[in-house]
Image (cartoon, helix red, strand yellow):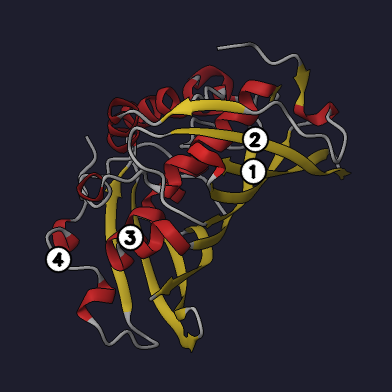
Amino acid sequence: MVSPLSSWQGKLPLVTRGGIQAGAALGPLTKHVTQEQVQRYAEASGDHNPIHLDAEFAARTPYGRRVAHGMLTLAFVSELLMQAFGRAWAESGKLRVRFKGAVVPGQRVTVSGRVRRVQAGPEGTTVECAVSVHADDGSEVLAGEAWVTTR
Amino acid sequence: MTQPTSSLGAVAVGQALPAKRYAMTPEAVASYLQAVDDRSGSCEARGIVPPSALLAYALRSVIEAASLPQGTVHGSQEMEALAAARIGETVTCQGTVVHNTIRGERRFVAVDLTVHGEGGRFLLQGRATVVLPP
């Protein structure tokens, strides 16, 4: 079973606490990815690619074993940003990520971000963040940028 | 679910895949949130669908419209949320192939994704780049 770090739960979104500044940290959020979760994600998303589900098939791929969906890892990033920016993330969030490596079921991953820039404009304040996901072996499995506009 | 009739790698650049409609029922959203282990309650409390769920359904529309060879991997992903979908809303998802090239032994296909809500509200757009095995 996956266990998120509870440090963010119950806290107000970053934006309602005010004072967003470049350099502010987002997270971290930690997830323990299991094969059971990968199976659940396949059911929820309709993505039954055997590279995620079939051990025999996955053994013949360059990964050599089953790997989690990239979109599952992306969902962790979106959760972090939703917790940080609240509804603004769902209404104005932009995300651009590269899947740099595979998450193997059984691994713990850490999702984190940092505010790069805060810029006021006519439509609100745009916050630019760097986001990343690291596996417990230290490898960066996802890297990207996010933007959100708060009004 | 309707089985796809063509392979994504065979879809020409510029071709729009058939649009698919999905009901973002409370059960569907709860199932998604459980699958991604999101226990924050951030979205349910606001009555909205997580943008990552809309993106996942947009990709689902592609998978249901065009088959992906076994072993296809996701290379990169972009998304832009334009409005929040309400839990209970029916959304329409569609993909359009915008790049389809071979580099080395692999085929790279980029698909632009759109999600519209009821009344034509534009909810989300994005681009998925997938790498098809040789």
Q: Identify the subunit bearing mark 2.
A: B
Which chain does tag 4 point to? A
The CA distance from mark 4 to mark 3 is 14 Å
Residue in the image at 74% along x and 34% along y = B132
How far separated are the C-alphas under marks 4 and 1? 33 Å
Residue on which the image places disc 2? B94
Query: Looking at numbered disc 4 in the image, what kind of residue is underneath it?
Result: Lys
Nearer to us in this view, A63 or B94: B94
Q: Count neighbours of disc 2 (C-alpha within 10 A) and say few if under 14, some if 14 to 19, many if 20 or more.
A: many
Residue with the mark numbered 3: A87
Give the structural element (helix, strand or loop) at label 3: helix
Relative to B16, is A124 above or below? below
Q: CA distance from mark 1 to mark 2?
A: 6 Å
Residue A11, numbered circle:
4
Observer-nearest residue: A34 or B13? B13
Amino acid type at image mark 1: Leu
Q: Which numbered disc covers residue B86?
A: none
Q: From the top left corner, tell me how far across and down residue A85 is, in percent.
A: 32, 67
Query: Nearer the observer, disc 1 or disc 3?
Result: 3
Q: Secondary structure at mark 4?
A: loop
> What residue occupies the far front of the structure in this picture?
B119
Contact between marks 4 and 3 (CB within 8 A): the answer is no
